Image (cartoon, rainbow, N blue to C red):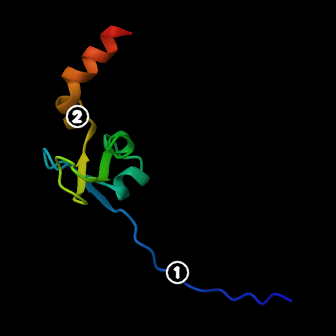
Amino acid sequence: MIEIEKKQVTQDVIVTKICDDCGKRVTYENYKNGIEPDVWEWQEFYHIWFTGGYGSVFGDTEEVKIDLCQHCLKKRISDLWEKKRNKE
């Protein structure tokens, strides 16, 4: 036999994404309601998160977290991206 109960669950939910470079704020509320440009900006926000390994230039076990909007990511990597794109 299996007994089932309804329970309320609390969880962390992202409500705003903030670019660490330009400070642009994009809200989930606007995304959910189809308010442009947040619809596209929400989907194209980038979260980089890693831990530096042994001997890493970032530091051993140092946690690196960066949130960038699509415009700032493109600005930061455009030279490398163009080189790669032109080689193909």
Residue 37 higher or lower than 27, as above or below: above
Residue at the spot 23% in from the left edge and 50% down from the top edge: 66
Query: To which residue does mark 1 refer?
Result: 9
| Amino acid under disc 2 | His
Q: In the rendered view, does 64 fall on the left or right side of 9? A: left
Q: Dot 2, how many residues are within 10 Å of its Cα: few (below 14), some (14-19), or many (20+)?
A: some
The single residue placed furthest to the right in the displayed view is: 1
Q: Is 34 in front, or is 12?
A: 12
* Residue 13 in which image quadrant: bottom left
Q: Helix, strand or loop at disc 2?
A: helix
Q: Is 8 in front, or is 66?
A: 66
Residue at the spot 22% in from the left edge and 29% down from the top edge: 77
First reached walking from the N terminus: tag 2 or tag 1? 1
Alpha carbons under labels 2 and 1: distance apart: 36 Å
Q: Dot 1, how many residues are within 10 Å of its Cα: few (below 14), some (14-19), or many (20+)?
A: few
Where's residue 40, x and y in %? 36, 39
Where's residue 32, x and y in %? 43, 54
Where's residue 47, x and y in %? 31, 49
Residue 27 higher or lower than 8, as above or below: above
Query: To which residue does mark 2 refer?
Result: 71
Residue at the spot 29% in from the left edge and 59% down from the top edge: 16
Q: How many marks?
A: 2
- In the picture, the quarter occupied by the C terminus is top left
Q: In the rendered view, does 9 fall on the left or right side of 34? A: right
Tag on residue 23? none
Q: Is 81 in front, or is 23?
A: 81
| Amino acid under disc 1 | Val
Q: Is 80 in front, or is 40?
A: 80
